[in-house]
Image (cartoon, coloured by chain):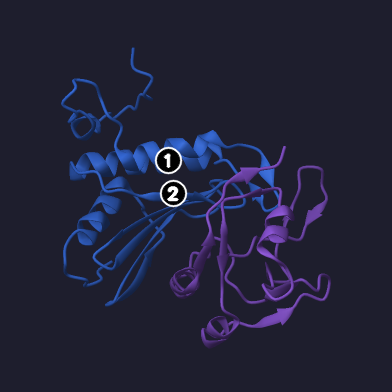
Amino acid sequence: MSTLPLFAENTWTASVARASSGFWTLPLSLSRLVSLLDDNGRDDYGEIGPSQFAFKTAFVLVAHAVSILDEDLAAVPVIDSEGGIRVTWNHYGKQIKLVCPATKDSPIYIYQSSAAGNSLRNHNVTASVLADRLVWLTTRESTIDD
Amino acid sequence: MRRRPKTRQDGTQDPGDDDGLSVYDSFRISKQECLEDSLSCHGLATLHVGTLRNMGLTVIRDPRDERKILVTDMPLENPNDERQEALLESVALSARIALKYTFRRE
């Protein structure tokens, strides 16, 4: 029986069902997010594990974005001192950051940067928007559009 | 990134890093002492004071701990601001990894 979480809109299986062994392989971007759950508690600087809100938000956004793209782009997730998650993708000298705060009191946003400039989107951040940004990341052009 | 001040669950105030981002001064503490001074660690990275100042940041001696310096205007965590994010990115890019070593003191 699968231990993967169930979503009302479970559209991400297309991208995780590629393994030739017949078993699902969790995309690297998601398995790294799951690895954040290995740690919990606090250290000198604050929380070392993610909050439930941050984890759920990041996991759902990234899973759906990977599904839309049908491609897994390796991401680097880190935890802030309050348990929020910052997920970073780098490619072709460009960068995307998905910022999922520890609680719903702070905004979720996407920051993107390249040699052409930077932009930040902090409203209506959806998996579709994240997927659009990740498509931009994988093209050699570095024009910023919001 | 600097931690924001906040109220703890017991009602007391956590000042966060409101006086600045505190970092060890490599001229006043060894790598080993630096690691042993922390409850947990994923490694050690170095920042150059001149580079930080060239970015417009203010770097001062920590008046409460002579082994440390404070970057008083380092952006706060998750600033939700394009320029502040860009500055954080510049600082991160300027950092050099000195040691990779993960531990957590029980």
Instruction: Using residue B38 as the reference point, say whether residue A38 is left or right of it.
Output: left
**Colour assignment, chain B:** purple
Tell me, yes or no, if residue B78 can be seen here.
no
Chain ID, blue in image: A
* Sequence order check, earlier mark of 2 and 1: 1
Check the picture and name the quadrant holding the N terminus of chain A: top left
Disc 2: CA contacts within 10 A as few (<14), some (14-19) or many (>=20): many
Q: Residue beneath label 2, please?
A: A77
Instruction: Using residue A133 as the reference point, say whether residue B77 is left or right of it.
Output: right
Q: Chain of mark 1?
A: A
Q: Are marks 2 and 1 in contact (CB under 8 Å)?
A: yes
| Amino acid tagged 2 | Pro
Instruction: Using residue B28 as the reference point, say whether residue A85 is left or right of it.
Output: left
Check the picture and name the quadrant holding the C terminus of chain A: bottom left
Looking at the picture, how far across and down is residue B15, in whole percent? 76, 61
Residues indicated by labels 2 and 1 sit on the same polypeptide chain: yes
Q: Residue furthest top?
A: A1
| Amino acid tagged 1 | Leu
Looking at the picture, how far across and down is residue A87, in whole percent? 41, 52
Disc 1: CA contacts within 10 A as few (<14), some (14-19) or many (>=20): many
Q: Quadrant of residue B22?
A: bottom right
Q: Residue at x 69, y 73 (%)?
A: B25
Q: Quadrant of residue A48?
A: top right
Between B48 and A143, the residue placed more toward the observer is B48
Looking at the picture, how far across and down is residue A104, in whole percent? 53, 46
Tell me, yes or no, if residue A146 can be seen here.
yes
Q: Residue beneath label 1, please?
A: A33
Q: Residue at x 31, y 48 (%)?
A: A74
| Label 2, label 1: how far apart the Cα atoms are | 6 Å
Q: Chain of mark 2?
A: A
Between B35 and A80, the residue placed more toward the observer is B35
Q: Secondary structure at mark 2?
A: strand
